[in-house]
Image: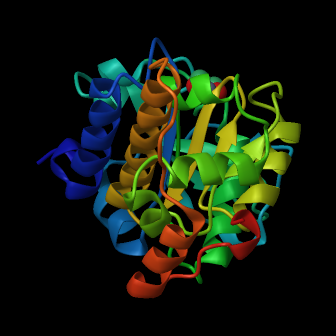
Amino acid sequence: MSILELDVIKNYVRACNDGWLQNWHERNGGNLTYLMSEEEVALCRPYFKETPGEWVKMDVQADNLKNAFFLSTGSGKYFRNVILAPQDNICILEINDAGDSWRIVWGLEMGGRPTSEFPSHFLNHSVRLKATNGKNRVIYHAHPGNLIAMTYILPLTSRAFSRALWQSATECPVVFPQGVGVVEWMVPGGRAIALATSELMKEFPAAVWAHHGLFVSGQDLDEAFGLMHTIENAARIFMLVTSSGMPIMQTITDDAIRAIAKDFGLTVREDFLN
Ligand code: 2HA
Ligand code: ZN
């Protein structure tokens, strides 16, 4: 038996490869973190390193993630390679008692560190855990091309992006009735973008990073991957329509979105509708 045969690892590796196959992860683009359950940690523990890595302090802290364990992609590692050698491209991290440092307990066997966006992931896990009464387990960042293209032609507001996406595919108000947040262009990997994103993730399940990509959350890998997929598919339709050269004859109206919300028993953000 190898740790790579455990469902928790297999499902995570599959999600990484699915993202690669979607063309969302050029080179080392994107990152995925998964908050492990106690049972999953117990199953993986026999495979942990005899000597864990050194504690590394972050410039962010979270009380509700003290002593947590995460699966994380590695900094500079390519999603494309995860399936070939998970043990060299991903890792399991342990968080300390203070909720402000991590150490590697499994993986990255050829060396390396967790994703450069780990502080962003960590703060967003903390925020989404609160927002979902302890249910959120996944934070996923990718570089889906159509959504990035939209950040050059729409105002960088949550209202403009939520409306444009809702109007681009009927599924959208059902899948994310809260809408999406938008973060203006910022330097990736730092505390500032982590804080700005986590402020938005108090309200939204996803945040657009202008000219960069998308951050999504989910209770499991299917939900997070599905949200990324739904948003990018709507963005693809939006870009097909806006680049078709044809005038727009009709769209999904605000009242249609209200009707969807009513029938599906959802609360769509009324302040985003006209
Ligand atoms: O991991 O996507 O935002 C590379 C990135 C940084
Ligand atoms: Zn990125």
Q: Residue furthest left?
A: 1
Image spot of residue 43 (x, y percent): 28, 63
Image spot of residue 82 (x, y percent): 32, 27
Closer to us: 216 or 253: 253
Q: Residue furthest top?
A: 27
Is residue 15 toward the left or the right of residue 242 in the image?
Answer: left
Q: Is residue 235 above or below residue 70?
A: above
Q: Is residue 239 above or below residue 50?
A: above
Residue at 59% x, 38% y is: 214
On the rendered image, what quadrant is the C terminus found in? bottom right
Residue at 40% x, 26% y is: 89
Closer to us: 221 or 72: 221
Residue at 55% x, 17% y is: 76
Closer to us: 189 or 111: 189
Image spot of residue 237 (x, y percent): 41, 35
Q: Quadrant of ligand 2?
A: top right
Residue 50 visible, this orientation: no
Image spot of residue 135 (x, y percent): 50, 76
Residue 14 visible, this orientation: yes
Is residue 121 toward the left or the right of residue 41 in the image?
Answer: right
Residue at 31% x, 42% y is: 15
Is residue 222 toward the left or the right of residue 24 in the image?
Answer: left
Q: Is residue 233 above or below residue 180?
A: above
